[in-house]
């Protein structure tokens, strides 16, 4: 019985302890939960506060940015308004100018009508005075012209006879001149003549072709005088234009290597040679730019610079002269504190106008400056190019440096050969005189300036007009140029019919 009571009591005591411990743990968990909730609330409160601060900051920044944008927009609107006003004024001025032009055109038309009436009245009066119609007057003019041509022919015969009588004295003078220029003859030959080595003597006959067709096609396509003499294994290309000689030399080498030599093939090969020379020109310009250490030269100016590789001035290679000057100019500019890049580019391009003097009238430094201005180069470069000769005052240090370097390069002993330059200039003038007439496709000065070969457009020049054109060119050469002996004017009119068999 006692044991049973003890057992019951122990069980009750154990159960009470278990429930007590459990209740204690529950209280502790509740306390921890309350602490965690409190901490979470504090952290949440802090986060909310920070978020509010950041939100306020973002709002302030957004307001500030919006204000700045509104201000900038207002400025833009103001500028646009000003431009609109300016444009309106310009439009009004243009309208006024257009109105003046219309009035001027109307007045000009009236004046033209008056001139026509006066001219017609004068023609009528002349017909009455001369008692000749317009057609009769033209006939008499043609007869007078025919007489003048006959007189010119007689004068030419007398001139040739007179020249023959003075031939001994002229030959003596040429011998003396040749002796005096012996030291520069090599330079002159380099500038006007190119020798091409043949594979064998039989090749001469193939180059000449049947009835001279091949050599005529070569001369026509290249504009170079081809001299075939008794020199074994050699023919000579003669032209004052070095690019033409290079094209002719390369064409001959390609033809000899290919073996097919006939007029159609010659045209194809000459076209290929011209493309290759263009590539060499571009490469020469790039090499010069790398050698002098300059950048920023437009592509068009770079090509013109490359052409100077084949140009000479007073016997001096223009590209080498320009490259040499650019190196010196860079050193001087560095020493005195001028812009080295501007100085180098201006010096390198100062003679670029010489590449197109045979195409554009004017002095080479003016032409070069206009080209530089056209392709958007710095105005300091333009001024330095234009002012490197004495007709324009140099106002910048870079321009003065270019002028000084040009004088220094030209003044050194052996730098220039005047005879070669005068010869080339006379050849260019002769071609320019020929091409000044309408209807002319090409003109080549050959035979050391004793002949000018003119190729005309057959659609615009007929056979009779070609005869008259030859006479007109000869007359203009006589009146505008000075030259020894006589110059043969050879006008060529050729019509081709081309069709393809399919």
Image: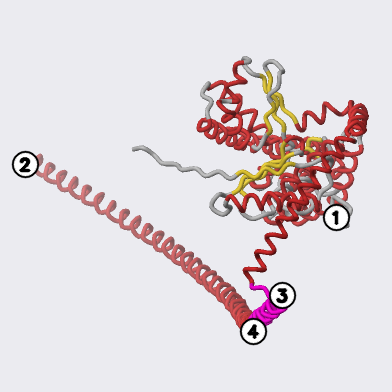
> CA gap, disc 2 to disc 4?
157 Å
Range of magenta residues: 111-133
How dense is the environment of label 3, judged by Cα within 10 Å: few (below 14), some, or many (20 and up)? few
In the image, is 340 to the left or to the right of 217? right
**Helix, strand or loop at disc 4?**
helix
Of badges 4 and 3, nearer the viewer stands 3
User: Which circle's residue, 1 or 2, is located before the other in the chain?
Assistant: 2
User: Which circle's residue, 4 or 3, is located before the other in the chain?
Assistant: 4
> CA gap, disc 3 to disc 1?
66 Å
Measuring 83% from the left and 43% from the top, which residue is drawn there? 158
User: Which circle's residue, 3 or 1, is located before the other in the chain?
Assistant: 3
User: Which circle's residue, 1 or 4, is located before the other in the chain?
Assistant: 4
Q: Which residue is mark 3?
A: 130
Q: Which residue is mark 2?
A: 1
> CA gap, disc 4 to disc 3?
30 Å
Q: Is residue 133 above or below residue 149?
A: below
**Helix, strand or loop at disc 1?**
loop
**Helix, strand or loop at disc 2?**
loop
Q: Do the numbered discs 1 and 2 sit on residues whose CB atoms are within 8 Å?
A: no
In the image, is 443 to the left or to the right of 482? left
Q: Which residue is mark 1?
A: 396
Residue lying furthest left: 1
Q: Main secondary structure of the magenta part?
A: helix
């Amino acid at each position: 019985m006692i044991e049973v009571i003890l057992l019951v009591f122990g069980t009750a005591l154990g159960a009470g302890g278990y429930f007590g411990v459990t209740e204690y743990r529950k209280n502790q968990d509740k306390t921890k939960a309350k602490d965690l909730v409190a901490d979470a609330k504090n952290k949440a409160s802090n986060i909310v506060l920070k978020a509010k601060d950041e939100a306020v900051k973002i709002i302030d920044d957004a307001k500030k940015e919006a204000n700045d944008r509104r201000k900038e927009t207002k400025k833009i609107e103001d500028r646009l308004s000003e431009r609109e006003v300016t444009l309106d004024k310009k439009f009004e001025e243009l309208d006024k100018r257009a109105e003046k032009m219309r009035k001027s055109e109307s007045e000009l038309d009236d004046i033209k009508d008056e001139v026509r009436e006066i001219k017609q009245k004068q023609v009528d009066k002349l017909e009455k005075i001369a008692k000749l119609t317009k057609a009769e007057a033209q006939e008499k003019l043609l007869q007078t012209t025919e007489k003048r041509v006959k007189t010119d022919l007689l004068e030419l015969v007398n001139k040739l006879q007179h020249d023959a009588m003075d031939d001994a004295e002229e030959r003596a003078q040429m011998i003396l001149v040749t002796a005096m220029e012996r030291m520069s003859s090599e330079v002159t030959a380099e500038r006007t003549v190119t020798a091409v080595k043949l594979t064998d003597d039989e090749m001469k006959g193939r180059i000449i072709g049947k009835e001279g067709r091949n050599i005529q096609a070569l001369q026509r396509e290249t504009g170079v005088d081809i001299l075939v003499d008794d020199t074994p294994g050699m023919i000579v290309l003669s032209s004052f234009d070095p690019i033409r000689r290079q094209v002719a030399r390369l064409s001959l080498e390609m033809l000899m290597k290919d073996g097919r030599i006939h007029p159609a093939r010659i045209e194809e090969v000459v076209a290929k040679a011209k493309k290759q020379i263009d590539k060499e020109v571009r490469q020469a310009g790039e090499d010069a730019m790398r050698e002098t250490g300059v950048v920023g030269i437009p592509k068009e100016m770079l090509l013109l610079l490359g052409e100077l590789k084949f140009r000479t001035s007073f016997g001096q290679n223009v590209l080498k002269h320009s490259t040499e000057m650019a190196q010196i100019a860079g050193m001087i500019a560095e020493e005195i504190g001028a812009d080295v890049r501007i100085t180098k580019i201006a010096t390198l391009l100062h003679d670029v106008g010489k590449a197109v003097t045979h195409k554009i009238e004017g002095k080479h430094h003016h032409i070069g400056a206009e080209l530089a201005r056209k392709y958007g180069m710095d105005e300091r470069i333009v001024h330095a190019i234009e002012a490197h000769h004495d007709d324009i005052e140099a106002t910048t240090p870079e321009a003065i440096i270019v002028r000084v370097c040009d004088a220094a390069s030209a003044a050194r002993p052996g730098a220039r050969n005047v005879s070669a330059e005068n010869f080339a200039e006379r050849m260019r003038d002769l071609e320019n005189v020929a091409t000044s007439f309408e209807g002319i496709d090409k003109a080549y000065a050959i035979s050391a300036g004793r002949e000018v070969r003119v190729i005309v457009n057959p659609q615009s020049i007929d056979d009779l007009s070609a005869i008259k054109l030859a006479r007109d060119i000869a007359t203009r050469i006589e009146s505008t140029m000075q030259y020894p002996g006589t110059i043969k004017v050879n006008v060529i009119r050729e019509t081709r019919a081309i069709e393809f068999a399919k």
